[in-house]
Amino acid sequence: MKVFVSGCYDLLHSGHVEFFRQASQYGDLYVGIGSDTTILNYKHHKTLYPERERLFMVKSIRYVKDAFINQGSGVMDFIPTVETLKPDFFVVNADGASEEKRQFCKDHGIEYIVLDRVPANGLEARSSTSIKKTLANNAQIPSPSLNLSEKGIPTRLDLAGTWIDQPYVSTYAPGWAITISLQPTFEIRERCGLSTSTRNQIKRIWPIHLPDMDPEMLAKLVFCFENDPERTDGIISGAQDAIGICMPGLCRHYYNAHYWPERIESCTDEHVLGWLENHLCMIPMFPRRPGCSVVEGKNITEIHVKALTEAAARCWDAIMNTDLSAFATAYQASFEAQTTLFPAMIQPGVQDYIDQYASLSDVLAWKMPGAGGGGYLALVVKDMTTFCQQHLEAIPLTIRRE
């Protein structure tokens, strides 16, 4: 009898070996391994070990009859391997189970088996995610000037009011931008709307952590450092990026024809932040393409800017009241106002992603982070945990508390 399992196996650990042992009890075990290209395109990061090295390590495990590099792509990259191998059993652990895999096995006459993640006797439970977190923690360099409660430089997600931090927009009507500061619990891709340019500037000064100082003062320092007066490209980065990264929790900042906001309000209430986390997630799309200009064809008028500011105000009120329906409505209205002001945010291919996820009953609203043009879809969903279980490509978010 032939048994098949599939995975990346980039951080090979005892949990993988025990999984192979359990799977091999059903017959001769064959392993499909995600290629370097698949992992880069699907998980959006390079592998620690190249595919040939991962293949060598997996083949060396005594429970494995043979192993192959999968020639497909995405989460179902194993399809060509399975169609060639024709296994009797397809074994997954509970974390990797999906209805799509189950249906594939049914269509191909393969018995589908789901195993619980159980460590070998006397060993701790291991997962690639937990190992990455441990490595990140161990890599930190203690220093009295560093805030050790955070793991790495945060990023930010703008929830509403994007573009109002540019004076050429807020001069038509003042208003709020709303941001949340995010723990870097996922691979933060370049040119994808999560203010990586500002984050990279921060890393030039503080490579590991933000310094332990007043967050608003820190945000102003970052803003001034990024917008060096000797900068020759003529672009001034909006303050919402520095504020969204440096100030923990949920923030709104009020802009009135100036680069720096007139006032900043923060919310670190656990009930509110936990509620937001339960209704937000992101879907990876594609990076903003080289040469893409989202400001081309801009359509900035008073009525359009007021639509943006009014949506942001409603969005804040809905969050404070933890009113999901009102939040989704205002969130969506803010995005529609942004794309009315800057239609080039919707670059070719973006609408395909929007159409795909907008059609799902548990998706209530959507937008692109930052200036758009690609990157991610930031979704408002009925329940984040359930949605991420059903859509493995979805990224849950962790809001930075302090």
Image (cartoon, rainbow, N blue to C red):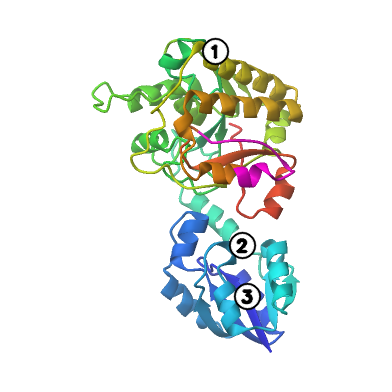
Which of disc 2 and disc 1 is earlier in sequence?
Answer: 2
Disc 3, SS: strand
Q: Residue at x 43, y 74 (%)?
A: 53
Q: Where is residue 96 shown, x and y percent of the image?
A: 66, 64
Q: Where is residue 15 shown, x and y percent of the image?
A: 63, 69
Q: Residue at x 47, y 73 (%)?
A: 54
Q: State the residue position of label 2.
A: 127
C-alpha span from label 1 to label 2: 52 Å
Q: State the residue position of label 3.
A: 5
Disc 2, SS: loop
Up-down: is 39 above or below 32?
above
C-alpha span from label 2 to label 3: 16 Å
Disc 1, SS: helix
Q: Where is residue 256 shown, x and y percent of the image?
A: 48, 10
Amino acid type, mark 3: Val
Q: Nearer the viewer, residue 261 or 130?
A: 261
Q: Nearer the viewer, residue 228 or 207?
A: 228
